[in-house]
Image (cartoon, rainbow, N blue to C red):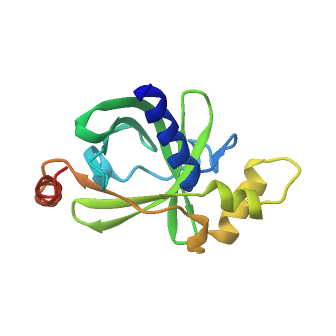
Amino acid sequence: MKKLLYLSLITISLLLMACPYEGTVELSSYEESLKVDKKLVGEWVSFHEKGGREELLIEKAVKSVFKVSHNQFGENNKFEQKYNYRVYSTEIGEYDIFNIESPEGKYLYCKYGWTGKNEFYIQFIDADFVDKNFKADSVTTENFKSFVTENVNKEEMYGEKLEFYRKYSPEYEKVRMFMKKSGF
């Protein structure tokens, strides 16, 4: 019974939250993508308000592709899921937009930016925004990239910022201590 209640609460919260758009096309190929930002290589952590966290291990695979291992932890440091992705970026406007390729060949898209020496954020392209504003009979790399280019500066195209801290950096320790003092 507890498992059913827990599953129901998770499902409801996911439906109420904005979710990232998952597509079938990439914004650019590996060959066309930008060189990797070497500052992103390493271990990163994002803390959630209710005590969960996301951990990323970002490694350089080739000149323009990252290999990312993503571990998701719930409340009380309970391991929930592990994901593996290939990530490569495309410059659109003033942003680098990541193509996040899953092993199933689906794509998520997000922009990223640096907020400090050991901090960066990502914002996923929002599924609701795409569903409401992207009018095409079929999705191709060309028409989806054109859509993203037209809307890249609109904040409503993106979900909430997810802040990551380099593991064991002073910024990470500061946030970790704050979360601990807050009871998480």
Asked if 58 appears above or below 172 in the picture, the reply is: above
User: In this rendering, is residue 27 above or below 163?
Assistant: above
Judge by depth and name the residue closer to the eye, 49 or 68: 49
Residue 169 image offset from top left, x and y in percent: 13, 54
Please state if 145 lies on the left or on the right of 94 as rendered: right
Furthest residue to the front?
Answer: 1
Is residue 95 found left or right of 176 in the rendered image?
right
Seen at 70% across and 70% down, the residue is 150
In the image, what residue occupies the spot 60% across and 74% down? 154
User: Looking at the image, which residue sits at the far right?
Assistant: 137
Is 15 placed left or right of 47 in the picture?
right
In percent of width and height, residue 39 lies at 28, 54
- Measured along the vertical axis of the image, is residue 59 above or below residue 116? above
Which residue is at 60% across, 41% downward?
A: 107
Q: Is residue 67 left or right of residue 158?
A: left
Residue 11 % position (x, y): 54, 40
